[in-house]
Amino acid sequence: MPQQTPLYQQHLMAKAKMVDFAGWEMPIHYGSQLEEHHQVRRDAGMFDVSHMVVLDLTGPAITDFLRRLLANDVARLNASPGRALYSCMLNERGGVIDDLIVYFMHDNGYRMVLNAATRDKDLAWIAQQATAFEVSIRERDDLAMIAVQGPNARDKTAKALGEALAPAIALKPFFAVKSAMMCGDELFVARTGYTGEDGFEIMLPAARAGDAWTALLAAGVAPIGLGARDTLRLEAGMNLYGQDMDEDTSPLEAGLAWTVAFEPAERDFIGRAALDAQRKTGPARKLVGLMLDGRGVLRAHQKVVSTAGEGETTSGSFSPTLGQAIALARVPASAGQTCEVEIRGKRLPARIVKYPFVRHGQPCITYTQTL
Amino acid sequence: MSNIPSELKYTKSHEWVRIEGDGTATVGISDHAQTLLGDMVFVELPEPGAALEAGEECAVVESVKAASDVYTPLSGKVVAANELLEDAPETVNTDAYNDGWLFRIRLEDEAELKELLDAEAYAELVAEEDH
Protein backbone atom coordinates (compact mmCIF):
# COMPACT_ATOMS: atom_id res chain seq x y z
CA MET A 1 0.00 0.00 0.00
CA PRO A 2 1.45 3.37 -0.96
CA GLN A 3 1.76 5.95 1.83
CA GLN A 4 -0.34 9.08 1.96
CA THR A 5 0.92 12.54 2.87
CA PRO A 6 -0.90 14.73 5.43
CA LEU A 7 -2.42 16.56 2.42
CA TYR A 8 -4.00 13.51 0.83
CA GLN A 9 -7.58 14.66 1.50
CA GLN A 10 -6.80 18.11 0.09
CA HIS A 11 -5.65 16.48 -3.16
CA LEU A 12 -8.85 14.49 -3.45
CA MET A 13 -10.91 17.60 -2.77
CA ALA A 14 -9.01 19.40 -5.55
CA LYS A 15 -9.84 16.48 -7.92
CA ALA A 16 -6.25 15.35 -8.29
CA LYS A 17 -5.32 12.40 -10.46
CA MET A 18 -3.32 10.35 -7.96
CA VAL A 19 -0.40 8.08 -8.91
CA ASP A 20 2.11 5.96 -7.06
CA PHE A 21 5.41 7.83 -6.83
CA ALA A 22 8.30 6.26 -4.90
CA GLY A 23 5.84 4.46 -2.64
CA TRP A 24 3.67 7.53 -2.08
CA GLU A 25 0.23 8.29 -3.44
CA MET A 26 0.85 11.68 -5.04
CA PRO A 27 -1.05 14.08 -7.36
CA ILE A 28 0.25 13.95 -10.95
CA HIS A 29 -2.11 16.77 -12.00
CA TYR A 30 -5.37 18.39 -10.98
CA GLY A 31 -6.83 18.57 -14.49
CA SER A 32 -4.27 20.09 -16.82
CA GLN A 33 -0.50 19.77 -16.46
CA LEU A 34 0.02 22.56 -19.01
CA GLU A 35 -2.19 25.04 -17.18
CA GLU A 36 -0.49 24.19 -13.89
CA HIS A 37 2.89 24.81 -15.49
CA HIS A 38 1.84 28.24 -16.76
CA GLN A 39 0.24 29.05 -13.41
CA VAL A 40 3.63 28.72 -11.70
CA ARG A 41 5.47 30.70 -14.40
CA ARG A 42 2.90 33.51 -14.41
CA ASP A 43 1.39 33.64 -10.91
CA ALA A 44 1.74 31.20 -8.01
CA GLY A 45 1.30 27.48 -7.44
CA MET A 46 1.89 25.04 -4.60
CA PHE A 47 3.25 21.52 -4.47
CA ASP A 48 2.84 18.95 -1.75
CA VAL A 49 6.40 17.70 -1.28
CA SER A 50 5.77 16.04 2.07
CA HIS A 51 7.09 12.78 0.65
CA MET A 52 10.61 14.21 0.67
CA VAL A 53 12.95 13.17 3.47
CA VAL A 54 13.84 15.73 6.15
CA LEU A 55 16.68 14.98 8.56
CA ASP A 56 17.86 17.00 11.52
CA LEU A 57 21.53 16.31 12.17
CA THR A 58 23.14 17.45 15.40
CA GLY A 59 26.21 16.84 17.53
CA PRO A 60 29.60 18.34 18.28
CA ALA A 61 31.15 16.64 15.23
CA ILE A 62 28.34 17.42 12.79
CA THR A 63 30.25 19.97 10.70
CA ASP A 64 33.22 17.61 10.38
CA PHE A 65 30.87 14.81 9.43
CA LEU A 66 29.10 16.78 6.71
CA ARG A 67 32.40 18.04 5.31
CA ARG A 68 33.30 14.36 4.85
CA LEU A 69 29.87 13.19 3.66
CA LEU A 70 29.08 15.87 1.06
CA ALA A 71 30.85 16.94 -2.15
CA ASN A 72 29.95 20.56 -1.47
CA ASP A 73 31.45 22.15 1.63
CA VAL A 74 29.14 23.17 4.48
CA ALA A 75 31.92 25.50 5.62
CA ARG A 76 30.71 27.70 2.74
CA LEU A 77 27.60 28.38 4.82
CA ASN A 78 29.80 30.48 7.14
CA ALA A 79 27.68 29.39 10.07
CA SER A 80 24.92 31.77 8.88
CA PRO A 81 21.66 30.62 10.44
CA GLY A 82 19.22 29.36 7.82
CA ARG A 83 21.66 29.48 4.91
CA ALA A 84 21.19 26.69 2.36
CA LEU A 85 23.61 24.73 0.21
CA TYR A 86 22.90 22.33 -2.66
CA SER A 87 25.16 19.28 -2.72
CA CYS A 88 25.63 15.78 -4.03
CA MET A 89 26.36 12.89 -1.72
CA LEU A 90 28.85 10.63 -3.50
CA ASN A 91 30.07 7.07 -3.25
CA GLU A 92 33.81 6.26 -3.28
CA ARG A 93 33.71 6.01 -7.09
CA GLY A 94 32.47 9.57 -7.31
CA GLY A 95 28.99 8.43 -8.37
CA VAL A 96 25.99 10.31 -7.04
CA ILE A 97 24.03 8.54 -4.27
CA ASP A 98 21.61 11.47 -4.01
CA ASP A 99 21.41 15.24 -4.34
CA LEU A 100 20.13 17.32 -1.44
CA ILE A 101 19.77 20.68 0.23
CA VAL A 102 21.44 21.24 3.58
CA TYR A 103 20.59 24.19 5.86
CA PHE A 104 22.76 25.50 8.66
CA MET A 105 20.39 25.79 11.63
CA HIS A 106 22.63 26.67 14.56
CA ASP A 107 26.01 25.64 15.94
CA ASN A 108 26.13 21.87 15.79
CA GLY A 109 22.84 21.60 13.95
CA TYR A 110 21.87 21.18 10.27
CA ARG A 111 18.71 20.25 8.42
CA MET A 112 18.91 18.17 5.24
CA VAL A 113 16.26 17.51 2.59
CA LEU A 114 16.71 14.40 0.43
CA ASN A 115 14.73 12.64 -2.31
CA ALA A 116 11.88 10.33 -1.35
CA ALA A 117 12.80 7.71 -3.96
CA THR A 118 16.24 7.20 -2.41
CA ARG A 119 15.20 7.35 1.26
CA ASP A 120 16.23 3.87 2.38
CA LYS A 121 19.64 3.77 0.74
CA ASP A 122 20.37 7.37 1.79
CA LEU A 123 19.58 6.69 5.45
CA ALA A 124 21.63 3.47 5.41
CA TRP A 125 24.60 5.24 3.81
CA ILE A 126 24.47 8.22 6.17
CA ALA A 127 24.17 5.96 9.23
CA GLN A 128 27.09 3.86 8.03
CA GLN A 129 29.31 6.90 7.47
CA ALA A 130 28.25 8.47 10.76
CA THR A 131 29.54 5.67 12.97
CA ALA A 132 32.98 7.34 13.13
CA PHE A 133 31.50 10.68 14.26
CA GLU A 134 29.70 11.92 17.31
CA VAL A 135 26.44 12.89 15.63
CA SER A 136 22.79 12.11 15.99
CA ILE A 137 20.33 11.93 13.12
CA ARG A 138 16.61 12.38 13.49
CA GLU A 139 14.18 11.84 10.63
CA ARG A 140 11.45 14.48 10.74
CA ASP A 141 8.60 12.45 9.31
CA ASP A 142 6.35 14.44 11.62
CA LEU A 143 6.69 17.39 9.21
CA ALA A 144 4.78 18.17 6.05
CA MET A 145 6.34 20.26 3.30
CA ILE A 146 4.65 22.66 0.87
CA ALA A 147 6.56 24.44 -1.91
CA VAL A 148 4.94 27.70 -3.07
CA GLN A 149 6.48 28.90 -6.33
CA GLY A 150 5.93 31.64 -8.89
CA PRO A 151 6.36 35.40 -9.32
CA ASN A 152 3.51 36.06 -6.86
CA ALA A 153 4.35 33.19 -4.52
CA ARG A 154 5.92 35.20 -1.74
CA ASP A 155 3.19 37.86 -1.68
CA LYS A 156 0.40 35.31 -1.69
CA THR A 157 2.08 33.17 0.98
CA ALA A 158 2.43 36.25 3.18
CA LYS A 159 -1.25 36.98 2.70
CA ALA A 160 -2.22 33.39 3.49
CA LEU A 161 -0.06 32.78 6.54
CA GLY A 162 -0.05 36.29 8.02
CA GLU A 163 2.02 36.85 11.15
CA ALA A 164 3.58 33.40 11.04
CA LEU A 165 5.32 34.32 7.80
CA ALA A 166 6.55 37.74 8.89
CA PRO A 167 10.11 36.60 9.71
CA ALA A 168 10.39 35.13 6.18
CA ILE A 169 9.46 38.29 4.25
CA ALA A 170 13.01 39.64 4.21
CA LEU A 171 14.72 36.30 3.47
CA LYS A 172 17.41 36.41 0.81
CA PRO A 173 17.42 33.65 -1.83
CA PHE A 174 18.74 30.37 -0.47
CA PHE A 175 18.11 31.31 3.15
CA ALA A 176 15.58 29.93 5.60
CA VAL A 177 14.15 30.99 8.90
CA LYS A 178 12.23 29.39 11.74
CA SER A 179 9.02 30.96 12.85
CA ALA A 180 6.04 30.11 15.04
CA MET A 181 2.49 29.36 14.01
CA MET A 182 -0.62 29.30 16.12
CA CYS A 183 -0.12 27.41 19.38
CA GLY A 184 3.63 27.77 19.09
CA ASP A 185 3.97 25.10 16.40
CA GLU A 186 7.19 25.45 14.51
CA LEU A 187 7.25 26.70 10.96
CA PHE A 188 10.41 26.51 8.82
CA VAL A 189 10.38 28.70 5.72
CA ALA A 190 13.11 28.61 3.06
CA ARG A 191 13.44 30.80 -0.01
CA THR A 192 14.31 27.84 -2.19
CA GLY A 193 12.58 25.76 -4.83
CA TYR A 194 12.75 23.50 -7.85
CA THR A 195 11.06 25.50 -10.59
CA GLY A 196 13.35 28.40 -11.54
CA GLU A 197 10.85 30.82 -9.98
CA ASP A 198 10.98 32.72 -6.74
CA GLY A 199 9.10 31.30 -3.77
CA PHE A 200 9.20 29.43 -0.53
CA GLU A 201 9.52 25.88 0.68
CA ILE A 202 7.64 25.55 3.96
CA MET A 203 8.02 22.79 6.53
CA LEU A 204 5.42 22.53 9.23
CA PRO A 205 3.86 19.98 11.58
CA ALA A 206 1.72 17.48 9.67
CA ALA A 207 -1.36 18.41 11.70
CA ARG A 208 -1.10 22.03 10.49
CA ALA A 209 -0.57 21.25 6.81
CA GLY A 210 -4.25 21.10 5.85
CA ASP A 211 -5.01 24.53 7.28
CA ALA A 212 -1.98 26.09 5.62
CA TRP A 213 -2.95 24.52 2.28
CA THR A 214 -6.51 25.83 2.59
CA ALA A 215 -5.26 29.33 3.46
CA LEU A 216 -2.92 29.29 0.45
CA LEU A 217 -5.77 28.18 -1.81
CA ALA A 218 -7.90 31.05 -0.51
CA ALA A 219 -5.03 33.46 -1.29
CA GLY A 220 -5.08 32.34 -4.92
CA VAL A 221 -2.27 29.79 -4.91
CA ALA A 222 -3.28 26.88 -7.17
CA PRO A 223 -2.32 23.26 -6.46
CA ILE A 224 0.27 21.89 -8.90
CA GLY A 225 0.99 18.21 -9.57
CA LEU A 226 4.19 16.26 -10.05
CA GLY A 227 3.75 16.40 -13.84
CA ALA A 228 4.21 20.17 -13.99
CA ARG A 229 6.90 19.94 -11.31
CA ASP A 230 8.92 17.90 -13.79
CA THR A 231 8.48 20.23 -16.79
CA LEU A 232 9.19 23.28 -14.59
CA ARG A 233 12.43 21.86 -13.22
CA LEU A 234 13.49 20.71 -16.69
CA GLU A 235 12.99 24.20 -18.15
CA ALA A 236 14.94 25.54 -15.17
CA GLY A 237 17.77 23.12 -16.04
CA MET A 238 17.65 21.39 -12.69
CA ASN A 239 18.76 17.78 -12.50
CA LEU A 240 16.42 15.02 -11.41
CA TYR A 241 18.09 12.28 -9.42
CA GLY A 242 17.83 8.84 -11.00
CA GLN A 243 17.30 10.36 -14.40
CA ASP A 244 20.02 12.95 -15.06
CA MET A 245 22.51 11.41 -12.65
CA ASP A 246 22.89 8.26 -10.60
CA GLU A 247 25.50 6.15 -8.81
CA ASP A 248 27.39 5.57 -12.06
CA THR A 249 27.52 9.25 -13.01
CA SER A 250 29.85 11.77 -11.40
CA PRO A 251 28.76 15.35 -10.77
CA LEU A 252 31.34 16.41 -13.37
CA GLU A 253 29.42 14.42 -16.01
CA ALA A 254 26.07 15.72 -14.78
CA GLY A 255 26.60 19.48 -15.09
CA LEU A 256 27.14 19.71 -11.35
CA ALA A 257 30.85 20.56 -11.15
CA TRP A 258 29.82 23.89 -9.59
CA THR A 259 28.46 22.02 -6.60
CA VAL A 260 31.74 20.26 -5.83
CA ALA A 261 34.07 22.18 -3.49
CA PHE A 262 37.59 21.11 -4.48
CA GLU A 263 39.04 23.85 -2.27
CA PRO A 264 40.40 23.53 0.37
CA ALA A 265 42.47 20.73 -1.13
CA GLU A 266 42.90 18.99 2.21
CA ARG A 267 39.17 18.39 2.73
CA ASP A 268 38.79 14.67 2.14
CA PHE A 269 35.16 14.21 1.14
CA ILE A 270 33.86 10.83 0.04
CA GLY A 271 34.45 10.42 -3.70
CA ARG A 272 37.18 13.05 -3.84
CA ALA A 273 39.93 10.75 -5.14
CA ALA A 274 37.74 9.59 -8.03
CA LEU A 275 36.74 13.15 -8.95
CA ASP A 276 40.34 14.40 -8.74
CA ALA A 277 41.36 11.67 -11.19
CA GLN A 278 38.48 12.51 -13.52
CA ARG A 279 39.34 16.19 -13.38
CA LYS A 280 42.92 15.47 -14.38
CA THR A 281 41.97 13.67 -17.59
CA GLY A 282 38.77 15.64 -18.13
CA PRO A 283 35.43 13.85 -17.90
CA ALA A 284 34.55 11.82 -21.00
CA ARG A 285 30.94 12.97 -21.04
CA LYS A 286 29.04 16.13 -20.28
CA LEU A 287 25.43 17.07 -19.65
CA VAL A 288 24.02 19.52 -22.21
CA GLY A 289 20.70 21.06 -23.10
CA LEU A 290 18.99 20.09 -26.37
CA MET A 291 16.35 21.88 -28.37
CA LEU A 292 14.61 20.15 -31.21
CA ASP A 293 14.66 22.26 -34.38
CA GLY A 294 11.33 21.09 -35.70
CA ARG A 295 8.16 19.53 -34.39
CA GLY A 296 8.17 16.51 -32.11
CA VAL A 297 8.80 15.74 -28.47
CA LEU A 298 12.05 14.78 -26.82
CA ARG A 299 11.86 12.10 -24.12
CA ALA A 300 14.37 10.44 -21.81
CA HIS A 301 16.54 7.65 -23.29
CA GLN A 302 16.52 8.72 -26.92
CA LYS A 303 19.73 8.19 -28.84
CA VAL A 304 21.75 11.34 -29.56
CA VAL A 305 24.19 11.30 -32.49
CA SER A 306 26.90 13.95 -32.63
CA THR A 307 30.08 14.26 -34.67
CA ALA A 308 31.97 13.35 -31.48
CA GLY A 309 30.01 10.15 -30.96
CA GLU A 310 26.76 8.96 -29.48
CA GLY A 311 24.97 10.01 -26.32
CA GLU A 312 21.53 9.77 -24.74
CA THR A 313 18.82 12.10 -23.53
CA THR A 314 18.37 11.81 -19.76
CA SER A 315 15.22 13.95 -19.42
CA GLY A 316 13.01 15.32 -22.15
CA SER A 317 9.65 16.93 -22.65
CA PHE A 318 7.69 19.53 -24.46
CA SER A 319 8.55 22.89 -22.90
CA PRO A 320 5.27 24.71 -22.25
CA THR A 321 7.04 28.07 -21.93
CA LEU A 322 9.08 27.79 -25.14
CA GLY A 323 6.47 25.82 -27.10
CA GLN A 324 9.06 23.36 -28.34
CA ALA A 325 10.79 20.19 -27.25
CA ILE A 326 13.73 20.39 -24.84
CA ALA A 327 15.93 17.82 -23.17
CA LEU A 328 18.97 17.23 -21.04
CA ALA A 329 21.40 14.80 -22.66
CA ARG A 330 24.68 13.18 -21.79
CA VAL A 331 27.01 13.41 -24.79
CA PRO A 332 30.74 13.04 -25.45
CA ALA A 333 32.67 15.93 -23.89
CA SER A 334 33.81 17.19 -27.30
CA ALA A 335 30.34 17.35 -28.87
CA GLY A 336 29.77 20.66 -30.66
CA GLN A 337 26.66 22.73 -31.24
CA THR A 338 24.42 20.44 -33.21
CA CYS A 339 23.36 16.81 -33.12
CA GLU A 340 20.59 14.49 -34.21
CA VAL A 341 18.12 12.75 -31.94
CA GLU A 342 16.59 9.42 -32.92
CA ILE A 343 12.83 9.47 -32.43
CA ARG A 344 10.85 6.40 -33.54
CA GLY A 345 13.58 5.41 -35.96
CA LYS A 346 13.94 8.87 -37.53
CA ARG A 347 16.87 11.17 -36.90
CA LEU A 348 15.81 14.75 -36.23
CA PRO A 349 18.18 17.73 -36.02
CA ALA A 350 18.63 19.34 -32.61
CA ARG A 351 20.65 22.20 -31.17
CA ILE A 352 23.06 21.71 -28.27
CA VAL A 353 22.52 24.64 -25.92
CA LYS A 354 23.50 25.90 -22.52
CA TYR A 355 20.71 25.50 -19.98
CA PRO A 356 18.68 26.71 -18.04
CA PHE A 357 16.07 27.11 -20.74
CA VAL A 358 13.80 29.36 -18.66
CA ARG A 359 14.37 31.51 -15.58
CA HIS A 360 11.85 33.71 -13.79
CA GLY A 361 9.25 33.19 -16.46
CA GLN A 362 11.53 34.24 -19.33
CA PRO A 363 13.19 32.12 -22.01
CA CYS A 364 16.95 32.42 -21.53
CA ILE A 365 18.19 30.59 -24.59
CA THR A 366 19.26 32.84 -27.41
CA TYR A 367 18.32 30.68 -30.28
CA THR A 368 18.45 31.67 -33.89
CA GLN A 369 16.65 29.48 -36.33
CA THR A 370 18.78 28.73 -39.37
CA LEU A 371 16.81 29.39 -42.49
CA MET B 1 -17.83 9.91 -17.20
CA SER B 2 -16.49 9.61 -20.69
CA ASN B 3 -18.34 11.02 -23.64
CA ILE B 4 -19.13 8.13 -26.06
CA PRO B 5 -21.36 9.23 -28.99
CA SER B 6 -23.72 6.45 -29.98
CA GLU B 7 -23.41 7.02 -33.75
CA LEU B 8 -19.68 6.14 -33.81
CA LYS B 9 -17.80 2.83 -33.81
CA TYR B 10 -14.82 2.14 -31.57
CA THR B 11 -11.78 -0.09 -31.11
CA LYS B 12 -10.25 -1.75 -28.07
CA SER B 13 -7.23 0.52 -28.53
CA HIS B 14 -9.51 3.59 -28.11
CA GLU B 15 -9.84 4.90 -31.65
CA TRP B 16 -13.23 6.01 -32.91
CA VAL B 17 -14.52 5.59 -36.48
CA ARG B 18 -17.22 7.55 -38.29
CA ILE B 19 -18.55 5.89 -41.42
CA GLU B 20 -19.13 8.68 -43.92
CA GLY B 21 -21.68 8.14 -46.69
CA ASP B 22 -19.09 8.38 -49.47
CA GLY B 23 -17.10 5.20 -48.90
CA THR B 24 -14.66 6.80 -46.52
CA ALA B 25 -14.30 6.68 -42.74
CA THR B 26 -12.92 9.26 -40.33
CA VAL B 27 -10.70 8.13 -37.45
CA GLY B 28 -9.78 9.81 -34.18
CA ILE B 29 -9.07 8.90 -30.56
CA SER B 30 -11.84 8.67 -27.99
CA ASP B 31 -12.62 11.16 -25.27
CA HIS B 32 -11.54 8.51 -22.76
CA ALA B 33 -8.14 8.18 -24.51
CA GLN B 34 -7.51 11.93 -24.63
CA THR B 35 -8.38 12.24 -20.94
CA LEU B 36 -5.90 9.52 -20.04
CA LEU B 37 -3.13 11.09 -22.12
CA GLY B 38 -3.69 14.66 -20.96
CA ASP B 39 -2.59 17.87 -22.69
CA MET B 40 -1.71 17.07 -26.29
CA VAL B 41 1.40 18.81 -27.65
CA PHE B 42 2.25 16.97 -30.86
CA VAL B 43 0.45 14.83 -33.40
CA GLU B 44 2.11 12.87 -36.20
CA LEU B 45 -0.29 11.80 -38.95
CA PRO B 46 -0.12 9.47 -41.95
CA GLU B 47 0.56 11.06 -45.34
CA PRO B 48 -2.44 11.34 -47.66
CA GLY B 49 -2.05 8.60 -50.24
CA ALA B 50 -0.47 6.13 -47.84
CA ALA B 51 -1.92 2.61 -48.03
CA LEU B 52 -2.64 1.19 -44.59
CA GLU B 53 -3.50 -2.27 -43.30
CA ALA B 54 -6.01 -2.63 -40.48
CA GLY B 55 -4.22 -2.78 -37.15
CA GLU B 56 -1.15 -0.96 -38.43
CA GLU B 57 0.50 1.80 -36.38
CA CYS B 58 -0.09 4.89 -38.45
CA ALA B 59 -0.11 7.95 -36.21
CA VAL B 60 1.31 9.15 -32.90
CA VAL B 61 -0.32 11.45 -30.39
CA GLU B 62 1.99 12.95 -27.79
CA SER B 63 0.90 14.66 -24.62
CA VAL B 64 3.20 16.44 -22.19
CA LYS B 65 3.21 13.13 -20.35
CA ALA B 66 3.77 10.47 -23.01
CA ALA B 67 3.66 9.36 -26.63
CA SER B 68 0.95 6.97 -27.72
CA ASP B 69 0.58 5.06 -30.98
CA VAL B 70 -2.61 5.20 -32.98
CA TYR B 71 -3.63 2.11 -34.98
CA THR B 72 -5.80 2.30 -38.06
CA PRO B 73 -8.92 0.23 -37.44
CA LEU B 74 -9.50 -0.18 -41.17
CA SER B 75 -7.47 -0.94 -44.28
CA GLY B 76 -7.33 1.49 -47.15
CA LYS B 77 -5.76 4.57 -48.63
CA VAL B 78 -5.49 7.73 -46.55
CA VAL B 79 -7.49 10.47 -48.28
CA ALA B 80 -6.92 13.28 -45.76
CA ALA B 81 -5.05 14.10 -42.56
CA ASN B 82 -6.18 16.80 -40.14
CA GLU B 83 -3.66 19.57 -40.80
CA LEU B 84 -5.26 21.75 -38.13
CA LEU B 85 -3.57 19.55 -35.52
CA GLU B 86 -0.09 20.56 -36.66
CA ASP B 87 -0.51 23.95 -35.00
CA ALA B 88 -3.31 23.11 -32.59
CA PRO B 89 -2.78 19.57 -31.25
CA GLU B 90 -4.83 20.51 -28.18
CA THR B 91 -7.92 20.25 -30.39
CA VAL B 92 -7.75 16.51 -29.71
CA ASN B 93 -8.40 17.35 -26.05
CA THR B 94 -11.09 19.94 -26.59
CA ASP B 95 -13.03 18.31 -29.41
CA ALA B 96 -11.97 14.67 -29.77
CA TYR B 97 -14.93 13.63 -31.95
CA ASN B 98 -15.20 16.57 -34.34
CA ASP B 99 -12.40 19.08 -35.03
CA GLY B 100 -9.93 16.73 -33.31
CA TRP B 101 -10.24 13.99 -35.96
CA LEU B 102 -6.92 12.50 -37.12
CA PHE B 103 -7.28 11.08 -40.63
CA ARG B 104 -9.80 9.89 -43.23
CA ILE B 105 -9.41 6.62 -45.07
CA ARG B 106 -11.07 5.12 -48.18
CA LEU B 107 -12.65 1.84 -47.14
CA GLU B 108 -11.27 -1.22 -48.83
CA ASP B 109 -13.03 -4.05 -47.07
CA GLU B 110 -16.49 -3.44 -45.64
CA ALA B 111 -16.22 -6.69 -43.66
CA GLU B 112 -13.70 -4.99 -41.35
CA LEU B 113 -16.49 -2.78 -40.03
CA LYS B 114 -17.99 -5.80 -38.28
CA GLU B 115 -14.90 -6.04 -36.11
CA LEU B 116 -15.54 -2.64 -34.54
CA LEU B 117 -17.28 -2.08 -31.20
CA ASP B 118 -20.53 -0.18 -30.94
CA ALA B 119 -20.89 2.59 -28.34
CA GLU B 120 -22.43 0.25 -25.78
CA ALA B 121 -19.65 -2.33 -26.03
CA TYR B 122 -17.01 0.41 -25.88
CA ALA B 123 -18.63 1.97 -22.79
CA GLU B 124 -18.36 -1.42 -21.10
CA LEU B 125 -14.69 -1.66 -22.00
CA VAL B 126 -14.02 1.82 -20.59
CA ALA B 127 -15.94 1.00 -17.41
CA GLU B 128 -13.88 -2.16 -16.93
CA GLU B 129 -10.62 -0.24 -17.37
CA ASP B 130 -11.71 2.29 -14.78
CA HIS B 131 -11.98 -0.43 -12.12
Image (cartoon, coloured by chain):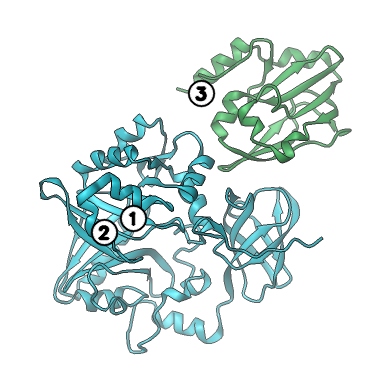
Q: Quadrant of the C terminus of chain A?
A: bottom right
Q: Quadrant of the N terminus of chain A?
A: top left
* Image position of A78 (left or right of B2): left
Please state which amino acid type lies under the numbered disc 1. Answer: Phe
Residue depicted at x 36% and y 60%: A192
Please state which amino acid type lies under the numbered disc 3. Answer: Glu
Q: Are marks 2 and 1 in contact (CB under 8 Å)?
A: yes
In which chain is the residue bearing label 1?
A
Separation (CA) of disc 3 from disc 1: 39 Å
* Residue of label 1: A200
- Dot 2 and dot 1 within a common chain: yes
Please state which amino acid type lies under the numbered disc 2. Answer: Ala
Residue depicted at x 65% and y 65%: A366
Task: Name the outermost residue toward the left.
Answer: A183
> Can you tell which quarter of the image residue A92 is in?
bottom left
User: Circle 3 sits in a helix, a strand or a loop, which is it?
Assistant: helix
Residue depicted at x 28% and y 53%: A202
* Image position of A98 (left or right of A336): left
Separation (CA) of disc 2 from disc 1: 9 Å
Dot 2 or dot 1: first in sequence order is 2
Which chain can be seen in cyan?
A: A
In which chain is the residue bearing label 2?
A
- Dot 3 and dot 2 within a common chain: no
Q: Nearer the viewer, mark 3 or mark 2?
A: 2
* Residue of label 2: A168
Q: Which mark is residue B129?
A: 3
